[in-house]
Image (tube, grey):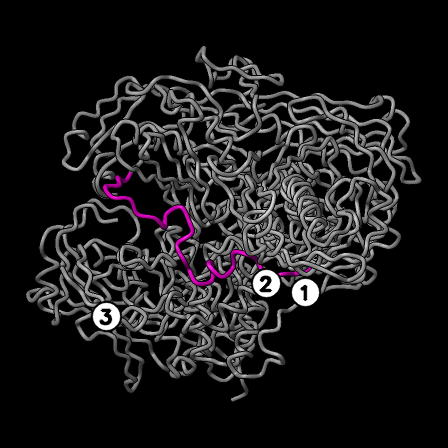
Amino acid sequence: MFLRMQAFERPTDLAEALRLLARPGYRPLGGGTAAVGPVDAETAGLVDLSGLGLQYSRMEHDGLVLGAMMTLGDLLGLPELLLIGGGVLGKAVERTGPPTLLNRATMGGSLVGGAPDLATALLALGAQVTLARLDAAGQVVCEMSDLERYEAEPATLIESVRIPVKPVLTGYERVARTPRDLPAVAVVAAMEQDGQFVQNVRIAAYGLAPAPIRLKAAEEELEDAAPIEAVIQRAAEAAAAMVTPPADLRGSSEYRRHLARVLTRRAVEAAAGRMGRM
Amino acid sequence: MRIELKINGRRFTPEVAPQETLLTVLRREGFYSVKHGCDTGECGACTVLINGKPTTTCNLLAMQVAGAAVETVEGLEESGELHPLQERFAQTAAVQCGFCTPAMIMAAKALLDENPTPTEAEVRRALSSTICRCTGYKQPVEAVLRAAADLRGESAGAGAEPQPEGVTPAEGTGAGGGAPSHDPAAVLTRTPLKVVGKSVRKVDNNKLVTGRPAFTDDIEHRGMLHARLLLSPHAHALIKRIDASKARALPGVHAVLTHQDIPRVSFTTAGQTWPEPSPYDTRSLDNKVRFVGDRVAAVAAETPEIAEEALRLIEVEYELLPAIFDPEEALKPGAPIIHDEPDCTGIGGYDATKNIAAEIHAQVGNVEQGLAEADIVIQRTYKVPQVQQTPIETHICITRLDENNRLEVRTSTQVPFHVRRIIAPVLGLRPSQIRVIKPRIGGGFGVKQEILIEDIAGHLTLKTRRPVKLELTREEEFRASRSRHPQILRMRTGVKRDGTLTAHEMVVVANTGGYGSHALTVQSNTGSKAMALYNCPNIRFDCKTAYTNLPPAGAFRGYGGPQGFFAVECHLDEVANAVGMDPLAFRLKNCLKTGDIHPLAAALGEGREGFEQRIESCGLPECAEFGKTEIKWDDMHVPSGLTKRRGLGVAFAMHGTAIPGVDMGAASIKMNDDGSFNLLVGATDLGTGSDTIMAQLAAEVLGIKPEEVLVYSSDTDMTPFDTGAYASSTTYISGGAVVRAAEDVAGQIQAVAGAMLDVPADDLELRDGRVYANDGSSVTLSEVALRSLHQHDQHQIAAIASKMSYDSPPPFAATFADVEVDVETGEVQVKKLVMSVDAGRIVNPALALGQIEGGMTQALGYAVSEEMVYDEKGLMVNPNFRDYRVFLADEMPEIVAHLVETADPFGPYGVKAVAEIPMDGVAPAVANAIYAATGVRMYEIPLTPERVWKALHQKE
């Protein structure tokens, strides 16, 4: 419920959208699934981004580029999804919500909260985000983990997300009260195979910090190693040792640290279990 | 701004404001099938198709979809013919309250448009966008699969109404026949029944599957104001100063009420029979707040936005008082006193100076002696959480003054007659100056046996002389309505080595929160249901219900039973284990049997003296046998995996059927020219299908089809009195009144027909819409009606009858759970639930099974995921469906509901209750299955991953 909203704008080019967003109290509107319901006494104007032509997806030589206004439902329908990390992205999107939500929620909106499984998977897959800013500041390409730094900046918009497409092995593990609940902890492990070794290991987790993080200590244990039991165990221990998880109704800090260990181990085992002979 | 929408193929150009949601605009244009349930898109009740895709509309601005094609359920009917989806939903109990039905149908339509041959998993995924609190999803999923087959042209005999499987007559109980009689012998000898026992189509389903305006909100009044409540941000505080002048000055605001503006009248919000056994500890608005969410002020304004803005302009200065949330701390000397005001009164051990809302002591035999005689004594403590009913329609009422200046209260309530009587003194009116109308209700589960908003809306209408609508948001519903009492239960049980119980004791500390509605009676049920299921010469039940600064508890389906049975059924599992007996065999050895005397009924009434009850029917052995086979009980010791372990668990349960000596229902029937009948009942169908049950009972007696009975329920000006829909009473009590009234009418029909056919009235039989003499001659009911109304000795064939009962024949149930536990993470996955219920004679199997399936699903939430969680200041941190976890269609385990039919001598045709007992057995069955899987006992629910992990961890 917007109490003080006076204006609803639907610009048709990005520069105009950014100029509108520079006005006090103006906010961008993607699908609106999170923004529209709750009582809001601050917003003076909404800038609907649906006229900017950002609903696209395109395959480039090394990555899948998704426009910020592409809905998660349309994303699920992309055949290219299966090329990425053994379909892990699709599974993470399905966990994000029921069809009614996926049909409205956008890629861009999902990056700024409300879609922890998806954000974790994107982080593990090494997705990059392209941000559009007002003329002087210009366009920026950043890692998922740097997104937070730009969120506070006025007149900044997520324009697109690029997901690398390369042969990557993944594992995705989560614990929740019910299958569709937000997870207490979710871990996505992604790695490339080099003979009997793995490299470019990226392990991302939700529920261990305020936002999804990389478990770099665990990644280091695995990088250029053969993922045998002892190594995986060390990586899992490293993951648990490096985090100080927050506590909420889905889990205490202690329990989440325990899950960091168990789920890192399981996610890496699942990824390593997909290694083929080379 | 004007936008264009194509709604169901027609062009609309509504004028919309930028902040208006599509939900608001669609309802304003008359598409009432689109429902408001949450504001966050999580409940899904507002789902429509936008350009063919299912989308929620409460979190979508109309401006966002300007130009789009919108489909609602109103567009599905073609030239009066229901769409196959509507038809298939209407045929079964896929529709219970019907509030979310249009949303489910539209989600299913989008699926079938894209995928004509969906799997069950795909159907469940599509329906997962809608929370249904009534059905357990099983019958909706089946309806969608059947409709898909219809649309493919594959259904054998498309349109044939499916008869559910899952009803077994108990042997030797004579359940093959029955009679509307109180004579046990008659139960066994009656000719086969024609309407009772059939899964007839619900009388209200067509209006619900087509989304016609039936609910409280589906009406417009000129000049209607929108009310909002200012809720307390503090758990315990005095209002030192409150200034509403700025709010009153805001243009569009018509009234602001604080405690300074209305008379101070103490009452209870519990909708119970007079004199209510709940303390009078509540005022419409008070100068003290007792929980985060307590009412501080109320506003009526021209739009919801203005009302919301006005709330922000009310200046309140609080003096914070120490708050207390733990019931045991609240009972200690020196604890802050929550009700220190002088104008509170109560019964049943009520002592506000000690924070005691109710205190109960009941004993049979001598427990100390029984413990001394025992070979083994087991003593354990159990804890159960606060959970909420969460009907998808929140509390809503619309008040106005009618042309006679009487206050009309249109409200979503289970207790219209109690509402009228209870709010009258609060508003300074006589009950006769108030008319309460109960339209269709979008679920209740007990939370609408509570008068939470009608008084405020009434005050605002009396102040403004304008119609006022007051509707709680989902967040307000969570923070400020009612919930299930959390309890701490201490069990002590003595047993002989042969498994004979010698002593059985339960000591409860319950938490009623800031107000004591149902504080005495819920807790007395904990004892009188859970502690009475097993024969034992020495039983004790002691309970104190404490006031604290949590949001109040109240009535919730099961009413004390789920709490008690979690403790008793987990505890006796451990006792069985201690004497080396199979938990199922142990239960069957000790449980009540036909002919036994209910051990606690006389000692524990509901705020009044109790009445001794003899168990006239008990199908527990048959229930257990069915469940044992279905869950493969004898395979329970098969080895399971290293990290994922399987186990089976069982729990028994017993409930009541109405409150003996208290509940009363009445019905009136009158005959129309065409041989149809108006049936007026005070009973309130809150989605259970009771209007249909009433029609079936009347039709059985009158020898007609149920559709010849026009059921109207309920309206304090029109229908006879009924205590309301609670305590599993409607089929037994209100149904009993319907049968009596119908028998009276049948006698009047026979008298007229006898004169027409010139035979003695006693020799006539009513069947197939006619009255037959022995020689085969007959007249139609219409001919009887026309003669009596127009031609000869003119009179209205009509009757009114009441029913009250001192007997409360208990239903019984056996619940089995098959569970997988991940011992590394503590995650519990319930694979399968089986519940077999002895609910006496079944009037409508599809509806009864629907009650069980829906109850099991709520009970599954109680077992594993639902819990109201608070921060250290008493603020609920999960007041939404994202964080308060109710099971969705695609999260469900396999559920099997089953009925064992017995015939009890007391109810009409031998009925007993079915609505509440499904709540009782799931949590203990799941906990016992976790023990079977892991060797670890769980003493607290919900069985969240962390709680189970901690228990497993402690064992190591």
Cα gap from disc 1 to disc 2, whole angstroms: 9 Å
- Start and end of the magenta stretch? B197-226
Q: Is residue B201 magenta?
A: yes
Question: What's under tag 1, amino acid-wise?
Answer: Pro
- A123 and A235: which is toward the camera: A123
Q: Secondary structure at mark 3?
A: strand
Disc nearer the start of the sequence (3/1) = 3
Q: Secondary structure at mark 2?
A: loop
Is B108 positioned to the left or the right of B708 in the image?
left
Q: Which residue is mark 1?
A: B164
In the rendered structure, find residue B11 and report the number of the disc placed on it. Answer: 3
Badge 2 or badge 3: first in the primary sequence: 3
Read off the chain for label 3: B
Majority secondary structure in the magenta region: loop
Residue B121 position in % (x across, y down):
55, 71
Chain at tag 1? B
Identify the residue under disc 2: B92
Please tell me the numbered disc located at residue B95: none
